[in-house]
Amino acid sequence: MNSEPDYRKMLEVAMGEARKGLAEGGIPIGAAIFDAEGHLVGLGHNRRVQDGDPSMHGETAAFRNAGRQRSYRRLIMVTTLAPCWYCSGLVRQFGFGTVVAGESRNFRGGLDWLRSLGVKVIDLDSEECVSLLANYIRAHPEIWNEDIGAE
């Protein structure tokens, strides 16, 4: 019998990516993709500000860094913030079975939609994730409002 993966430990990997993004002057949102056994497959962080690329969300970066997979159904997308509609579409398009969000207070994203499609959604409601992004939004409202929660 398989035990439940340690989602909080997985979130720590995504948080490391979020901190990296913040250190680079970007929006502190990180993501990591794990297989069902908990092995890291890919990771990344939001690079919209650094690269001037509106499509480079944390989930997108992790997805690209994971490379081509035979199937995405058993993969777990872990992100520090609830995925936006763009990233929720990526999860849906490629058939990820599980999404773990660090938080959804700063931005609700597509969690309810993903749930309605049968994706297992876990919202860890991490205070650390909430404050990291809330502090960034307070300090840089012009950047956040540029795409009004496009992440």
Image: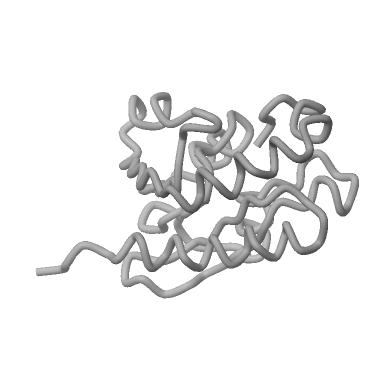
Residue projecting furthest to the left: 1
Residue 96 in sight in this render:
no
Give whichever of 99, 75 is nearer the camera. 99
- How far from the left and from the top, in percent, is residue 21? 72, 59
Q: Residue at x 61, y 44 (%)?
A: 133
Give whichever of 124, 83 is nearer the camera. 124
Q: Residue at x 44, y 65 (%)?
A: 34
Quarter containing the N terminus: bottom left
Quarter containing the C terminus: top right
Give whichever of 57, 21 is nearer the camera. 21
Q: How many marks?
A: 0
- How far from the left and from the top, in percent, is residue 78? 47, 54
Residue 39 in sight in this render:
yes
Q: Is residue 29 left or right of residue 3?
A: right
Q: Residue at x 36, y 29 (%)?
A: 117
Q: Residue at x 60, y 56 (%)?
A: 30
In the picture, residue 61 is in which quadrant? bottom right
Give whichever of 141, 112 is nearer the camera. 141
**Is 34 placed above or below 150 here?**
below
Residue projecting furthest to the bottom: 39
In the picture, residue 45 is in which quadrant? bottom right
- How far from the left and from the top, in percent, is residue 90? 58, 40
Q: How is the image coloured?
A: one colour
- How far from the left and from the top, in percent, is residue 139? 75, 40
